[in-house]
Amino acid sequence: PLLEGKYPIFLDADDDVSPAMLRSTVAYALSRKPKVVLAPYTNEAVYNLPNGSNLVVVQGMLATDRRLWVERNPSSSASDSTTLRALRLVDYPWQKIVCTRWMQLHGIYFGVSAVQNDVQFHWSAVLWAGKSILFMPVDSTPLVHHKKFLGAARMQLTKNSADRMEMLGAVQATHAHVSALDGFCSSRAALLWAKKVENFFSWALNQRLVPRPSIAEFKRRSAAVMRCVSACSNSRCLLVS
């Protein structure tokens, strides 16, 4: 393993990190020693205008994530509620820092697919952390400013290409890892995971991310993966091709 720091953060090329907030987040982690610390972020829409200039609109944290940040569920234990809240956050890799030793001990890494490789990292990190998860205050300075480039000049190589089929492999790899955790298949997290996968596949089709020639194959294979995820069967997932 190449990681040496105690709490690394993973960034995309379109992310800016706040050095002061990063120092505060790491200091908080070192003092409390959790396995995962989640920190607020903000999204920024960058519109490429016809004249070549950019218009930046600060959008803030996603509303769904913000609600989860402050949510309390009195019907759940404190640790169960925290884990489920963290799992329901968008699978962004850069709103969390994870203990390096913990990652190496439990094989918590990104997937190898061209798309959605951060799903495996998010779900594995949160599930293996269990009750050792802390949320930074929701109104803290954002740790990361994530840019979404929009407009005519925007190009994303995997937006609508055959690479999108690799999301099936991303789900399979994630399921193989999380279903190996003791007690997962009988947990509320397993139900949440199955719903996540179902919504995931529907999103890809509804957003027309799967190329038209690949739609029939995608539907066939995603249905097979969905069956094995719902049954919490790792062996059946590995047989899907």
Image (cartoon, rainbow, N blue to C red):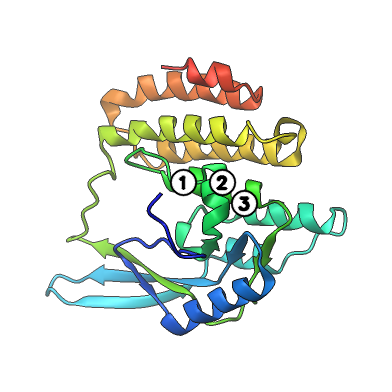
Total numbered badges shown on the rendered structure: 3
Considering every residue shown, the one lying at the far left of the view is: 51
Q: Is residue 23 above or below residue 175?
A: below
In this picture, residue 105 sits left or right of residue 72: left
Judge by depth and name the residue closer to the eye, 138 or 17: 17
Q: Which residue is mark 2?
A: 105
Q: Give the residue drawn at x 51%, y 57%.
A: 100
What is the spatial separation of the Cα atoms under label 2 and label 3, in whole angstroms?
14 Å
Give the position of the C terminus as an image quadrant: top left
Q: Quadrant of residue 197?
A: top right
Q: Is residue 44 above or below residue 230?
A: below
Q: Which residue is mark 1?
A: 109
Q: Is residue 205 above or below residue 94?
A: above
**Amino acid marked by disc 3:** Val
Dot label at residue 15: none
In this picture, residue 26 sits left or right of residue 78: left
Dot 2 or dot 3: first in sequence order is 2
Dot 1 or dot 3: first in sequence order is 1
Residue 127 image position (x, y, % from top left): 65, 46
